[in-house]
Image (cartoon, rainbow, N blue to C red):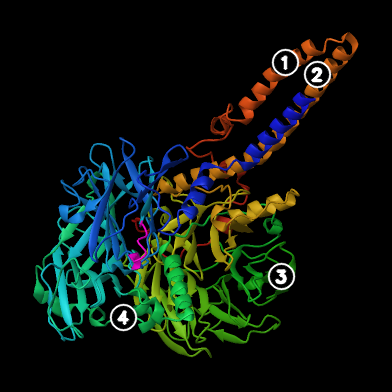
Amino acid sequence: MAGFVNSLLILLLFQNICLGFRSPLSVFKSYKDTSRSPSSECLGSDQPVISFGLSDFALDIRMPAVTPKQSDTYLCMSVPLPVSDEAYVVDFKPHASMDTVHHMLLFGCNEPSSTDNYWDCDEGTCKDKSNILYAWARNAPPTRLPKGVGFRVGGETGSRYFVLQVHYGDISAFRDKHKDCSGVTLHLTHQKQPLIAGMYLMMSVNTVIPPGKKVVDADIACHYKRSPMHLFAYRVHTHRLGKVVSGYRVRNGQWTLIGRQSPQLPQAFYPVKYPVDISYDDILAARCVFSGEGRTTETHIGGTANDEMCNFYIMYYMEAKHAVSYMTCTQNINPEMFRNIPQEANIPIPVKSDVLKMMHGHHEETKDNDASYLLQQAKKEEAEILDQDFHIEEAVEWPGLDLKLGQVSGLALDPENNLVVFHRGDHVWDENSFDSKFVYQQRGLGPIEQNTILVLNPSNAKLLHSTGKSLFYLPHGLSVDKNGSYWVTDVALHQVFKLGAKDKEPLLILGVALQPGSDKNHFCQPTDVAVDPMTGSIYVSDGYCNSRIVQFSSDGLYVMQWGEETTLGRPRPGQFRIPHSLALIPDLNQLCVADRENGRIQCFRLGTGEFTREIKHKAFGRELFAVSYVPGGLLFAVNGMPYPGEAESVQGFVMNFSTGEIIDTFIPLRKSFEMPHDIVASEDRTVFVGDVHAKAVWKFASAEKMEHRSVKKAGIEVQETKESETIVETKLKNKPESTDLLKNMDKQHLVQQASSTGVSFVLITTLLIIPVVVLLAILVFIRWRKTTVYGDNSDGEHKLDSSSGRILGRLRGKGGGGINLGNFFASHKGYSRKGFDRLSTEGSDQEKDEDDGSDSEEECSASPLPPAPSSS
């Protein structure tokens, strides 16, 4: 029976190994979490390298258990790149506390200044040219690079060593003689990045701060003489006397802000709020504002905590063929130009005194609630800095796609988060709808006899309420205010309406019925309406034959307007060619407009109409139909069908509002987008898209929600993991302008397959091993019978041990390492670092009625001009 018991033990061991298997990405995430240990738990001199996936690995760079002997000590240590071929650093994770570390710098070079385990940085960091890759100070959160961007290392041109420099300011924290292992973990990949990151350092070297002087400016400016670069993050650095640091691009006398921050707050790399590009002969300028109050002697630029520094770091990316990894500016080419610097650069950013105490290490003087406040602030800043990793896919079980609708022109969410649909019933917009003066020609049809406003349960598409019968001719835009009132536009009536949820008659009407115009009292095919939840101000995009945004007071009185028709050439800020959709960003006091035929998003300040930014990508193509904003910084949009010969496909977009970067694109799995006309997203990031040609509404949800629902439906209870380790598979369309989205898809596909295969692998293995166990039991029984019948106990036992030993040996080989689970999953069908084939929803899947023709359902553009060429 011993063999039988051993078999069962091996089976249990094998099952435990299978159940304990985690994908390489999960292992790395757990590793990153456990690496947040206190500085007393040092890793020693061995620098761990962890591989996850076929092309990615992590490199942990830590001080080798050091104890600085005096304040303002700079210690350096080096780590060789563990691979010889080219790699890319795509992520940084710091491990340090301002209790012990003033700041850290990470350099890349080919020959460190010393081969010792660590050394005093007075000997230098590198013998050859060094590049700054990363900087940290004051409990700054991690830095993330945009997708598709990486620092190039290794190979023929990249750095072969990393050198970590740590500045230990006040060493009173080392009274207990503990060892420090501060450092940074790098995430590297062998996948080529289309865009190469670099660092531009602006630094004052000769500033002197007189004692007691209230305001001292340190100015830096240089001409830029290289290929174009795109700025995506900035960091400021001074010591205690710094009040504010600001950086600008100066082009043709115009100052454009790159970033502005107090150096007394966490010195992270903050995202550049609005995309800034730098071209040949632009000027890069920066100003540090200091105060010498409280000092009794002059303060100079230097390396100790009692000296000062004025640094403005810029992270940028360039096309790989033109990439330069590191540039500096230490002069001021034109002191006179700083007379025109924006006034904001001279205004200190206030920092609470308790925060200042904590930032400078005086913890004993702060209360617990102060620490809690600082922690919340740090988390908020980290949330703003970290790239938002968000993926959605169609909710294929949502029955709303099968609703019998007319042309779907508008979507919104009411205060209960129900979906509100605005459709055209049996009316269509075609070439016969308007004459050359935009007067509606089909009044004889009468208003639409169906309810045009439908309220649906967002989970099951059940009709909850409907209204709008016999009111409208050609519905277009829709929004719902904070009180639940519906605001709609009708392009045939040239009017804007406010309706209560249960009112059959409008509460407010703007415009004159069936009369197009461009004055304060008329519209011409108005497209959308938005209501400011704070002030009640009404904003109308007007429209197909006007190119303006009109603002009204909450009671419908005209306030102002802005915008003009697009002229020939590249459209300028404030010019429109069909302002088609509106998205309010009340927390940032902005209104964003889908400038349809210009293929872009324009944003303006509420109340003034001041232009703030443009978001435009090549992937948009020539038309961008609709835009929606979700509090927290996500922007959603849908574009139009490509023109013949153009490659940009019709799809939805998820964007980081702060940077304008496309995070993801998405398409439906059932049917295909034909003319997606409006989009709306909820705070839980559920997205709905209405299509005017397909007469359909799609629902999209985060992939992790879809995974959770599918697992729950299958009757399998899965223990919740941390959100950062949620295992999902996304069926998303590749981001056209970046290969890094494909990389993320590969990673998630790998993780999902590893996990899902792990579950199924356990079940399959169990089923396969049961017969083996039964066979072993039979063998045991037979041997036992033989020994009972023939009495040859010793020989029988010997043979049993030998026979079962061979079987158990094979089992031990499988359970104890003989089978390579990595190779198993690598050979499993569908597993690939190259991603997976996206299901095509074009061509054969398209359910367009060929007999209808495009004319019968075409939404016509009023602009007689051909579309301007798209540029990103």
- Residue 67 colored in magenta in the image: no
Estimate the spatial distance between the alpha carbons at disc 1 and disc 3, rounded to whole Å: 81 Å
**Residue 182 placement, left or right of 32:** left
Q: Mark 4 and mark 1: span between their CA atoms?
A: 80 Å
Pointer 4 residue: 349
Q: Amino acid at mark 3?
A: Gln
Report the side of 392 relative to 594 (left or right).
Answer: right
Q: Earlier in the sequence, mark 1 or mark 3?
A: 3
User: Picture coordinates of residue 252 (x, y %)?
Assistant: 17, 69
Q: Secondary structure at mark 1?
A: helix
Amino acid type shown at disc 4? Ile
Q: Residue at x 59, y 32 (%)?
A: 829
Give the mark, 1 or 2, whose residue is nearer the N terminus: 2
| Label whose residue precedes the other's in the sequence (4 or 3) | 4
Q: Which residues are magenta?
A: 173-180
Distance CA(mark 3)–CA(mark 2): 77 Å
Task: Report the residue marked by disc 3.
Answer: 450
Callout 2: 10 Å neighbours few (<14), some, many (20+)? some
Whether the residues at callouts 4 and 3 have beta carbons within 8 Å, the answer is: no
Compared with residue 795, is residue 869 higher up or lower down, i.e. above or below? below
Q: Looking at the image, is mark 3 or mark 2 nearer the viewer?
A: 2
Q: Quadrant of the C terminus?
A: bottom left
Seen in the picture, residue 467 relative to 168 is either above or below; the reply is below
Tell me, yes or no, whether the two marked residues, 1 and 2, touch with CB atoms within 8 Å: yes
Residue closest to the eye, 575 or 320:
320
Q: How far apart are labels 4 and 2 at the CA level?
A: 81 Å
Mark nearest the camera among 4 and 2 is 2
Reply above or below: 313 against 196: below
Q: Amino acid at mark 1?
A: Ser
How dense is the environment of label 1, judged by Cα within 10 Å: few (below 14), some, or many (20 and up)? some
Q: Which residue is mark 2?
A: 779
Tell whether 250 sits left or right of 454: left
